[in-house]
Image (cartoon, grey):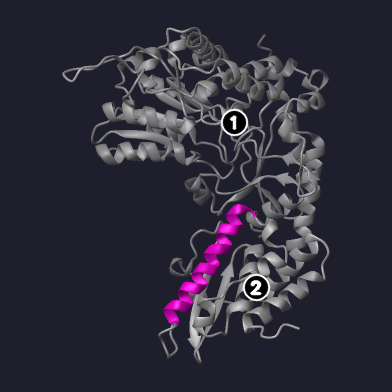
Amino acid sequence: MMVSMTEIQRREQAIIDEFELFDDWMGRYEHLIDQAAKLPAIDEAFKTDAYKIRGCQSQVWLHAGRQNGQVVYTADSDAAITKGLIALLIRVLSNLPPGEIVTADLRFLDAIEMKEHLSPTRKNGLNAMIKQMKLYAAALSGADHPHTA
Amino acid sequence: MPASPATVRPTVAFDVDRVREDFPALHQRVNGAPLAYLDNAATSQKPRAVIDRMAAYYASENSNVHRGVHTLSQRATDAYEAGRELVQGFINARHAHEIIFTRGTTESINLVAATFGRSRVRAGDNIVVSTLEHHSNIVPWQFVCEEKGATLRVVPVSDAGVLDLGAYERLLDERTRIVAISHISNALGTINPVRALIAAAHRRGIPVLLDSAQAAPHAELDVQALDVDFCAFSGHKMMGPTGIGVLYGKEALLDAMPPYQGGGDMIESVSFAKTTYNTLPHKFEAGTPHIAGVIGLGAAIAYLEAIGMDAIAAYEQELLDYATERLADIDGIRFIGTAPEKAAVVSFLIGNIHPYDTGSVLDRLGIAVRTGHHCTQPLMERLGIPGTARASFAFYNTREEIDRLHAGLLKVRTLFG
């Protein structure tokens, strides 16, 4: 239908389609928690203060590395909903060139009606996650060898 | 009027449905469900009497206080000072001028730390607080200790959240300048044995500041019976407006303290050579005060007194007992804070479920609880937990709301189990 969907838009649409299968918030929450369970585990060595995202009420650790010119994220959180949200962000943004990540304009969180289910502190936390993912991508944009941010 | 708790039978006299009619904010739907407001330790809702009184003040009495020759200013001054007398009566202070209006408990404590603390504390002295304290009863004293080279001594608590009185007595010595301690713990609900704490400090000539932010809305507060030296509380937790708080201090102590902030109203005369200060309470109330706030607080006190603090305390105790019993069957629930003397606060964790997840799901169901460290990070560290979910009750809460909390927690269990 759409002529030129970017990779990010294609990934977002897949998530939107999944969430449309649920007609109540309980179902969407359950799906989000399932996403958390599927999140590739972050190396325990990165679960330190240096990799913590500030601005989240729960603890979130995010790591970014570069493989074959693409940014690869791993993350974890001690809260399931938060972990589900970062899992969705990683599905959308991981394994892409840094430039695409830095310029991404994400819309799927509104479309899946998750944002309205989030408290203001959680929205701030979510924005902090996106910002940190973009900062890592920007930091990795110059590097052409495996590198940790 | 004061009745012993054993003789009070509030369920007969206490009509919660009628009381709820007085609180407009309770009658709304949140996320499609009727609001169950269980975050009263953070702030209470406001009765119509308070909202209307403040609106009436702005509509027809608004004027500045204490310096106007005109009629409106006199009316505003009368209403403002009447608010002070209502507070005096509410806590049974000896004098109205022992009531200082502040922005809230935090400012009240900061005022004492900045004036009494900074003028009395020297290098090598110590200040005693407890592990239960809210950050607002820790950080102001840390300022003083850092500036003066003094030490902050901390009364330990048990796993149940009870202060260690033996350790408390051992911390007090001839270099202790003040004891600053919570009356009721905001995070756990522990009611501290304040009479014993104050008496032990006084035996050594040490003054005591009580953080009564959680106590003022829930039980009778008699500063003379307690013989407490300073007592701080907030209007917004006791059905009054935000931005208004109280510092009670014994006259002799307040008189001896230097002023807090400089400005209008707090002076007797000003010249570039020498400024002399006004008498109590104005010495500590620089600038135009929160006139509407004081008037609203007065209306809140009148409202609380009409219901009766004994009836409120007894009904809230029933809610606490019911909630503790009702929630006990949630698989994996762990109550944080199990002191024998507790106010209507239920702090808990369920299995390994993060309190933030618990709170988020309850919010979807229209149930408002607090999650996190409740501004008591040292206490959470002592208990070895990152935070809790906390339901805190007021006299307008119902058993039905506790049943909904129970059902909500079963959903939480299902989702995150």
Residue B319 at what x, y percent from top left? 74, 33
The residue identified by callout 1 is: B237
Observer able to see residue B330? no
Q: Using the image as rendered, state which of residue A45 and residue B118 is in the foreground.
A: B118
Q: Using the image as rendered, state which of residue B188 and residue B340 is in the foreground.
A: B188
| Residue farthest left in this picture | B273
Give the crowd class for mark 2: few <14, some 14-19, many >=20 residues within 10 Å. many
Q: Which residue is at 48% across, 86% downward?
A: A66
For residue B155, side relative to residue B283 (left or right): right
B52 vs B224: above or below: below
Assign a secondary structure to mark 2: helix
The secondary structure that dominates the magenta segment is helix
Q: Is residue A135 magenta?
A: yes
Q: Which residue is at 65% across, 69% downward?
A: A107
Q: Which residue is at 65% across, 11% downward?
A: B2
- Looking at the rendering, the stretch of residues picked out in magenta corresponds to A119-140
Residue A85 at what x, y percent from top left? 64, 67
Residue B78 at what x, y percent from top left? 51, 9
